Image: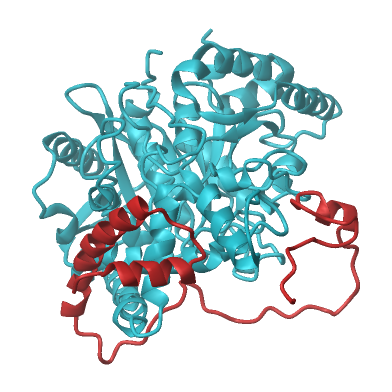
Chain colours: A red, B cyan
Amino acid sequence: MKITIEQVDYVAILGRLALSKEEKLKYMGQLDDILKYMDTLSAVPTDDVEPMAGPVELFTPLREDVVKPSLPIEKSLSNAPSTDGSSFLVPKIIE
Amino acid sequence: MSNLYEKTATELAGLLSSKKTSSVEITRSVLDRIDAVEPKIHSYVSVYPDLALAMAEEADRRIKAGRGNSLTGIPIAIKDNMCLQDKKTTCGSRILSNFSPPYDATVVRFIKDEGMVILGSANMDEFAMGSSTETSCWGPTKNPWDTDKIPGGSSGGSAAAVACGQATVALGSDTGGSIRLPAAFCGVTGIKPTYGAVSRFGLVAYASSLDQIGPFGRDISDIALLLNLLCRHDPMDSTSVPMSHPDFTSFLNKDVAGLTLGVPVEFFDKPGNRDVEKSLRSARDVFEKLGVKFVDMSLPSLNYGIAAYYVIAPSEASSNLARYDGVKYGHRSKDFESMIDMYCKTRAEGFGPEVKRRIMLGTYALSSGYYDAYYLKAAKIRTLITKDFKRAFESCDAIFAPVAPAPAFNIGEKMDDPIEMYLTDVFTIPVNMAGLPGISCPAGFSGTGLPIGMQLIAPHFGESKLVQLVAAFQRETDFHLKRPSI
């Protein structure tokens, strides 16, 4: 299977990456090579195999629902690129 | 007497408790060493001399008052992907270059509570994606044994710092070999604990089902001390396993006669590097003289480890890294037209080439129409790898393996060939896939004087067995005592 430039464009949009023309061409070739290598996986019979999401037995640890101190607003906002002192500021999304 | 910066944490703890030195003296010695060699090695993203000396003074007061623990007053470097409150934590990435976390990672809290001395943040591949520490936005770390070579990655700064006395011990993280590989290339000892043994709270996520924090030291006794500190249940990490761990130092002097090591044919049947083969053969001789038995075995699914890993890890990464949107923290592009445009430009400017490549790969593997062929298939192969290991441990106590196919390679050598770079991790990746503990320790040198590592892998929560085996090996060998002349 060959990766096309249209597929690269589509995946870059899904991944929210503005790529240059050169980057797109480079990733097109590299993704193609990498995916060819991945295709060795299709040779492994896995019909009766359960997929594994993680190495530990997943369970939901429960705890008492008690109010605990949390970060003050100024601390939570201290790394934000743009704030009004109480909220994160983002570009307008509704006209 | 050798310099304080050359001593192990175990030796320094002895000197501290018998009042033969102070934490301030030790810390000054290590900081002077950093001044002397950092321009050549570049182990650190940030060094905090004032913080370190203040912590050392506090440690000395604590020891004087009789409240010192085993690691109080010992200097440590922290990989740049663990949150250090109000200090830069950049993950080697431009997108986090101004990020100062408002809280400490749980492991950092343990280190502070113990009274250890934090020296600074160690350099790493951007978002821990790499095997060479070349993808850091701050530039590469050099291998202290040969500065034309890479130190291994992604925790290359942590390993290099410990190798050349820029830190007594260090913390790293290991998603596909990122502790074990640089430990091998830099000639130090490093362990990736069992998934769930050490809290990941405050560790910047790369691939959450594979990431695990672990320590570097110059010998196994330092690793045992650090495991005692790190392996603790943390309610802030829902994958942290609630169980009690043994005192790992109690396994340092245990006999290993009668133990069995498994030798997977899949790790030894590829055309290999002669120096690596020679070192592994001699290591086997050492163990056999100690009464350890070796048994050949086959784990056929190991052959698919790399391919499955490079589906699963980038898939998890593409999802984890969605949070870097220029809103709550990190870099935001100055020039954009809309919300989506802001995301796309922010991320294009903030991420480096390897991170972008893995986001593209992971996004593709998870996208509609390809999920079954890639992610689901890889997740099933992960099950097969885990089952193969489980079966193997029915006939051995631990598995004996190389860490890397060859010693450290040249800076720049594999930067334009992602698959060649990915293949460096062929022996380390299956361990993360199954969530097992794996240790890397010095086992020889190449003809040109580069360190070569040996890897031992144990069943889940079998860290104590690894400590026992490596301690016995280090009693018989002196590879771990050799230091680079820099």
Horizontal side, residue B73 vs residue B204: left or right: right
Judging depth in this view, the residue of B344 and B21 nearest the camera is: B344
Q: Which of the 4 quarters of the picture holds residue B310?
A: bottom left
Q: Look at 70% across and 34% down and name the residue there.
A: B116
Judging depth in this view, the residue of B257 and B277 nearest the camera is: B277
> Residue B164 appears at what percent x and percent y?
46, 21
> Where B297 sits versus B56, above or below?
below
Residue lying furthest bottom: A48
> Where B482 sits versus B188, above or below?
above
Horizontal side, residue B115 vs residue A49: left or right: right
> Where A48 sits versus B216, above or below?
below
Q: Look at 76% across and 53% down and name the residue there.
A: A80
> Where B451 sits versus B260, above or below?
above
Q: Look at 75% across and 68% down and name the residue there.
A: A92
Residue lying furthest top: B1
Q: Which of the 4 quarters of the picture holds residue A66?
A: bottom right
> Residue B6 appears at what percent x and percent y?
51, 18
Q: Look at 58% across and 62% down and name the residue there.
A: B341
Q: Is residue B459 visible?
A: no
The quarter in which the C terminus of chain B is drawn is: top left
Q: Is residue B407 visible?
A: yes
Q: Which of the 4 quarters of the picture holds residue B108?
A: top right
Horizontal side, residue B92 vs residue B460: left or right: right
Judging depth in this view, the residue of B229 and A93 nearest the camera is: A93
| Number of marks present in the image shown | 0
> Residue B398 appears at what percent x and percent y?
32, 58
> Residue B366 appears at what percent x and percent y?
41, 76
